[in-house]
Image (cartoon, helix red, strand yellow):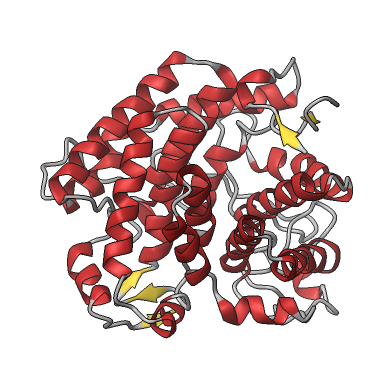
Amino acid sequence: QHLFALNQVSLSASPFLHAQQTNVRYLLALHPDQLLAPYLREAGLEPKAPNYGNWESTGLDGHIGGHYLSALSLAWAATGDEELKQRLDYMLSELDRAQQATGGYLGGIPNGDEMWQQIEKGEIKADLFSLNDRWVPLYNIDKIFHGLRDAYDVAGSDKAKQMLFKLGEWFLATTAKLTDEQVQQMLYSEHGGLNDVFADMYFISDDERYLKLARQFSHNIIIEPLLHKEDKLTGLHANTQIPKIIGMLKVANASDDKAWQQGADFFWKTVSQERSVSIGGNSVREHFHDKSDFTPMVEDVEGPETCNTYNMMKLSKLLFLKTGDTRYLDYYERATYNHILSSQHPEHGGLVYFTSMRPGHYRMYSSVQDSMWCCVGSGIENHSKYGELIYSNTGQEL
């Protein structure tokens, strides 16, 4: 199965078109220079504006900037709005300035240079939410990798492609002396979908080093049980795992690894059929609960996280394209209508972190200038993708 590009499918008057347009206003309300500030600071350049607050100035500095590249690329492809393209070009030119100042590195991680030097020497101290005393820096740099990939793959920017592979060369050099055991130790820290983007870089370049890197940065302790059809997910931080499996499937597709393909499918079945509620979302307080007891899902105010559904839909799309099986579309459709569409405030465009399943509860929406959560980063991407799976084709057949 193949998809049509977003610019080949247009939405007619509907709640989906309304959500897409509302999201464009949200994107244009964000200030690029504030999103760029962490990258310029870490490159030793003078920022043109102060950092945003919230997560953008408490350790996860720069993560929204990576999502913003993806969001602008998707929104421009979906709408053709030239102001979005101008924003994207400006972001890339300023990020290019920062990357040139560092010789390849691009990131907003506070005092990141010192940390990467430690990593390069094999000095690694990792737990779920930190690596070498920084707040999930691999997760953070994953966002700029994905943003550059989308600026090239979705928006067609050759500059973004050059920057992506410049960052890739830096990453290869930084991790070159690490053993597989040291890399696996690093992967205890949340790292997004690094294996996903490295696999894509292999598809783009045909450079085997990136396929090797993608397999090396796949988290074996999560993958191994899936290969034996074992559900060991209870108690794990839910969204940390889903991007790993997207990458697992891409690595499997690149190397025709049937066992990894089946393992990724087992994960999808387990999460979508046994660990999700009717809206398509999963997890309580960001973690997988015991699948034999959904009481916490009903009682807790922190129900399904929007990020989780965003990533489960990515996995569903890949599995559909691989197999043509419409059960993946059934999940995708249910999650689109009942979770993703409802995660955006229909007037001011604010985005939801948790959708509570607690009867009579309420939702908390983001404020465009003040809220810089993970579900804002993925949320600004979500509402430009309503056209991506309305149609697919097999070359000759619609």
Q: Position of residue 130 (x, y in %)?
A: 38, 74
Decide which of 256, 227 is in the foreground and name it: 256
Q: Tell me what residue is drawn at x 37 percent, y 56 percent.
A: 141
Decide which of 365, 385 is in the foreground and name it: 385
Q: Position of residue 198 (x, y in %)?
A: 47, 56
> Is residue 169 toward the left or the right of residue 299 in the image?
left
Decide which of 367, 123 is in the foreground and name it: 123
Decide which of 205, 3 is in the foreground and name it: 205
Residue 297 in the image: above or below residue 188: above
Residue 155 in the image: above or below residue 52: above
Residue 207 in the image: above or below residue 67: below
Q: Quadrant of the C terminus?
A: top right
Q: Tell me what residue is drawn at x 36 percent, y 20 percent.
A: 86
Q: Tell me what residue is drawn at x 32 percent, y 82 percent.
A: 124
Q: Position of residue 105 (x, y in %)?
A: 24, 53
> Is residue 340 toward the left or the right of residue 176 in the image?
right
Q: How many marks?
A: 0
> Is residue 233 toward the left or the right of residue 377 in the image?
right
Residue 376 visible somewhere in the drawing: no
Q: Quadrant of the N terminus?
A: top right
Q: Position of residue 362 (x, y in %)?
A: 68, 51
Q: Tell me what residue is drawn at x 69 percent, y 20 percent.
A: 9
Q: Quadrant of residue 16?
A: top right
Residue 284 visible somewhere in the drawing: yes
